Amino acid sequence: MSRAPRKKAARKSPAERSAEIADAARDVALEHGLYAVTLRGVAARIDVAPALVAHYQPDMHALVASTFGVIVSAELEEVEELVEPLPSPSERLAVLLDTLLDGSRDDVTVVWVEAWALGRRNEALAARVRDEMDAWRTFVQGIVEAGIAAGEFETDDAASVAWQLLGMIDGLNAHALVRWEDAGDRGSRIGHAVEGMLGLGRGALATR
Amino acid sequence: MSRAPRKKAARKSPAERSAEIADAARDVALEHGLYAVTLRGVAARIDVAPALVAHYQPDMHALVASTFGVIVSAELEEVEELVEPLPSPSERLAVLLDTLLDGSRDDVTVVWVEAWALGRRNEALAARVRDEMDAWRTFVQGIVEAGIAAGEFETDDAASVAWQLLGMIDGLNAHALVRWEDAGDRGSRIGHAVEGMLGLGRGALATR
DNA sequence: CCTACTATTGATCACACGATCAATAAGTTG
DNA sequence: CAACTTATTGATCGTGTGATCAATAGTAGG
């Protein structure tokens, strides 16, 4: 398949082409995973010679790393905007959990899982993964600390709780990625777990 | 490095050589990850021609899948033997969590994470991953159900709770794999989370 | 001891990867 | 309109992967 006899790509400004390549890399990663972000894969997507991608991105490891960063930081920004307007820390946390566990972000979950694996052979990516994880941790920690200040939550180590929350979320999503069979109920019972972590009463974290 | 001028491998019986190859694949996976389980990688480890490995394992995807299965099922068996003698479900659960989160099994965690990623391109592996996940779920579910029967735990869906527990464990371990910086405290607060899930009082799951 | 069997090997193929470079052609500038 | 700049390309290299196959060399059986 894919009989596409490319003639010659239109000449574009470096800024334009560079952005086009970054976008193509992001799209490829979301559709086929980070492993598909290759010289030839990205080039084929925008119908351009592989050498052109190499011209703008002399180091593929770096492109994979920045593509990961673009996807994951966009997700964080999106979730932040969704959660921040909410009045109480409890509500922010409940919506955060519901959003991240609703199963609508499997493409991003794949990127996370592949980044953990690929990071072992791509140091630039590994560094980026740590940075993005830390950004997420900071965000969640902020919610937890606000909850403590408001007297809603009870814990003595907000950072540790934030890490635990993120670990649980990522683990449940990664699992759901593989056992697609009955992946409907991920997050159904995590509310009780979080209540236990934060000293809340049973059912205190309901949203619906 | 690795100046090893191999002369000729000693002739062995098919059963012996076959087992040797399986062991080599397992060792390679534990030391360098599932991605390193290649024709040449396994062959080099036992100082044999790549073609010999191909002779015994005509399909590399299958070897990767079975290698994953060997590693993970051995881990399950090991944990089962450690936990089963304990008298109460609460203790079994507490020791299970402590054991799986003590940070001494990062090599196996790498295998899990890489299997989730690789499973997208290796259907045999994906099937094996689902099987092993189900075996783990069955095991944990057994502990939970025993706890319910003994009046120690309180939940109406043991299977779902088992999935959640495993998801949390795998997520925390995967995280610790990447942020090796301060990976000491994984599992420090998961006890409270589990207490919340199972309707236990605070501190009911302490071991030490 | 000789023959049949087969474990083992080197050579080789086809493919995909990242990378490099001289040549070309589309713009831009003087 | 000519000269220059540079975006784009095809060709090619080196490496790593799985796979195949005829040739070789141990081993067992008659």
Image (cartoon, coloured by chain):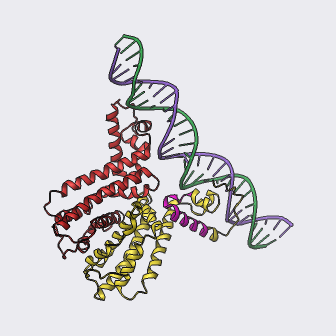
Chain colours: A red, B yellow, C purple, D green
Residue in view at x 35 percent, y 72 percent: B187
Q: Does A204 appear in magenta?
A: no
User: Residue A6 placed where, x, y %?
Assistant: 39, 34
Q: Does B37 appear in magenta?
A: yes
User: Residue A51 placed where, x, y %?
Assistant: 44, 36
Residue B173 against residue B120 in the figure, above or below: below
- Using the image as rendered, state which of residue B135 and residue B59 is in the foreground: B135
Residue A98 visible? no
Residue A200 visible? yes
Left or right of residue A126, residue A84 in this image: left
**In the image as oriented, which residue stretches furthest toward the left?**
A87
Which quadrant of the figure contains the C terminus of chain B?
bottom left
User: Residue B112 placed where, x, y %?
Assistant: 43, 65
Left or right of residue B97, residue B13 in this image: right
Residue in view at x 70 percent, y 65 percent: B11
- Residue range in magenta is B18-39
**Dividing the picture into quarters, in which one does residue A160 lie?**
bottom left
Left or right of residue A92, residue A18 in this image: right
Residue in view at x 39 percent, y 78 percent: B96
- Using the image as rendered, state which of residue B111 and residue B206 is in the foreground: B206
Residue in view at x 39 percent, y 43 percent: A42
Q: Would you say the magenta stretch is mainly helix, strand or loop?
A: helix
Q: How many marks?
A: 0
User: Residue B1 placed where, x, y %?
Assistant: 63, 53
- Using the image as rendered, state which of residue A8 and residue B193 is in the foreground: B193
